[in-house]
Amino acid sequence: MQKIVNPATGMLITELPDSDEAAVDDAVYRAHIAWSDWLRVSPGDRARLLRRFAALVEEHKEELAGLETLNAGHPISSARWEAGNVADVLGYYAAAPERQVGKQIPVPGGVNMTFHESLGVVGVIVPWNFPMVIMTWGVAPALAAGNTVVVKPAEQTPLTALRLAGLALEAGIPEHVFQVIPGDGRTGALLAEHPAVRKIVFTGSVEVGKQVARTAAERVKRVTLELGGNNANIVFEDADIRQAAASAPYAVFDNAGQDCCARSRILVQEGAYEEFRERFTEALLGVKVGDPTRDDTEMGPLISAAHRERVRGYLEREADVVGECPTGEGFWMPPMAYFDVGQEDPLWTDEVFGPVATVTPFYDEDEAIALANATPYGLSGSIWTGSVGRALRMAREVEAGNLSVNSNSSVRYWTPFGGVKESGIGRELGPDALDSFSDVKNVFISSE
Ligand code: NAD
């Protein structure tokens, strides 16, 4: 049984049984049977069903946001954005069934055509940090491309996934086309291993991602891996320091730092270091930490007591700046920053996944690039500069799948999202994700 807990209070919300081998097998078997039914639904009707699903999510936005706040501790304003993103992503991919077209390629001796064939059952394994959003990034393009989906939510945060599966049925998506099987890592491993699962979309830690990739390799399954990050926020002297410093806390402390795109390694050019330090300190101390159901809360609790212990394990010395946070029940931790952190510090080398920022000075572009890339990760990052040439040079040199210039945003559902190096394989969102949920079949018809 999994205890589902409200991280802001530590109170039990409910308990859910783990899906064992028989339950996983049953779900995958039903998804496999449902695949042929789903393929018989015409592209126009599949599009209509996905649009209806998106509309129902929009209608239930407040309920879904409230559920995510309850179960994951997200500030309600963030959770509302997340529920909106779920509706947007479903709506975006709803256009796909009617637009995914093959090619006719000129060849001698006949006609050559290509078809996009769906893969079959797709397993989507989800982490706890952005439960409904990350789940939807896998589910929406998979369904649009004609696959059926079995989702394994994180053991801590299954509530929005279960509710969304209910809304899909309500929208008219046939039974077993989209199923959710709660459980922990053992359930995830069973799903990844299942011979009838043709693709795994895994979002989570690098360590488990490597395990999933090894399992997938045994049966040559397709995989998309969205793994950890330890991202650089690079601030040059010629940037708008006021703006860079004011937005830097949000880029780390959003979701209490439990964000694979958190720009927790802040690199600041020497000439701007003191000004940045002063302004960033002031902004950090202004972060509103507390009851996530309040509209003005900016940072909620960590997901669990165990995760808070893990983050605390990194805090060998006292931070240079420490913000405020509630002291009662719940898995609270204040936002904090360490200045002048070197490359050997575990705070700098590891993905801490908590509300901890490091600030490190650099001298010039070459040093900034070397520092930014001195990590096995390569997910996202920001470059703050007033020079277009420098922005372009840096954007080409920093090893990351998603970079923003004079902005800390990483996610726009029209554009690809994913990592390089140990941050993952493949892309979610945008048109690229859709292509990864089908195989191209080539058919030649002889005219001789
Ligand atoms: P995790 O790897 O512990 O778990 C992720 C999911 O995998 C959970 O559902 C878990 O039950 C399941 N799982 C655990 N062991 C498994 C196994 N052996 N086989 C199959 N599934 C298994 O990660 P987490 O702690 O839930 O999430 C935090 C991590 O996720 C961080 O490293 C973060 O960077 C990463 N993340 C990455 C992205 C991205 O898009 N790159 C987005 C969000 C989170």
Image: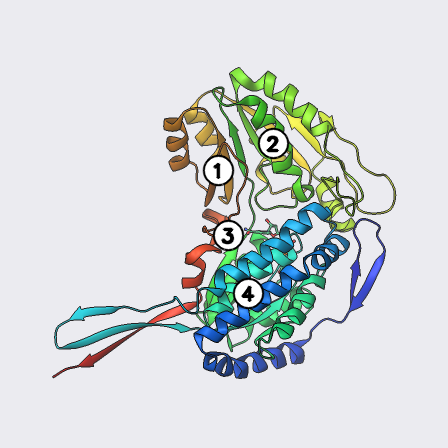
Location of residue 335 in the rendering, given as x and y in whole percent from the top left corner: 72, 34
Q: Are marks 1 and 3 in contact (CB under 8 Å)?
A: no
Q: Which residue is mark 1?
A: 404
Real-space CA distance between mark 2 and mark 4, rounded to the nearest whole angstrom: 32 Å
Q: Please rate how many residues cluster around mark 4, counting C-alpha atoms within 10 Å: few if below 14, some from 14 to 19, many from 20.
A: many
Q: Which mark is residue 413?
A: 3
Q: Which residue is mark 4?
A: 139
Real-space CA distance between mark 2 and mark 3, rounded to the nearest whole angstrom: 22 Å
Location of residue 384 in the rendering, given as x and y in whole percent from the top left corner: 49, 28
Location of residue 440 in the rendering, given as x and y in whole percent from the top left corner: 34, 70
Q: Which residue is mark 2?
A: 248
- Upstream in sequence: badge 1 or badge 4: 4
Q: Identity of the amino acid at label 1?
A: Ser
Position of residue 429 relative to residue 43, above or below, is above
Q: Identity of the amino acid at label 3?
A: Tyr
Q: Is mark 4 within 8 Å of ligand 1?
A: no
- Upstream in sequence: badge 1 or badge 3: 1
Q: Identity of the amino acid at label 4?
A: Val
Q: Identity of the amino acid at label 2?
A: Ala
Real-space CA distance between mark 1 and mark 2, rounded to the nearest whole angstrom: 13 Å
Say what secondary structure mark 2 lies in.
helix
Quarter of the rendered structure image containing ligand 1: bottom right
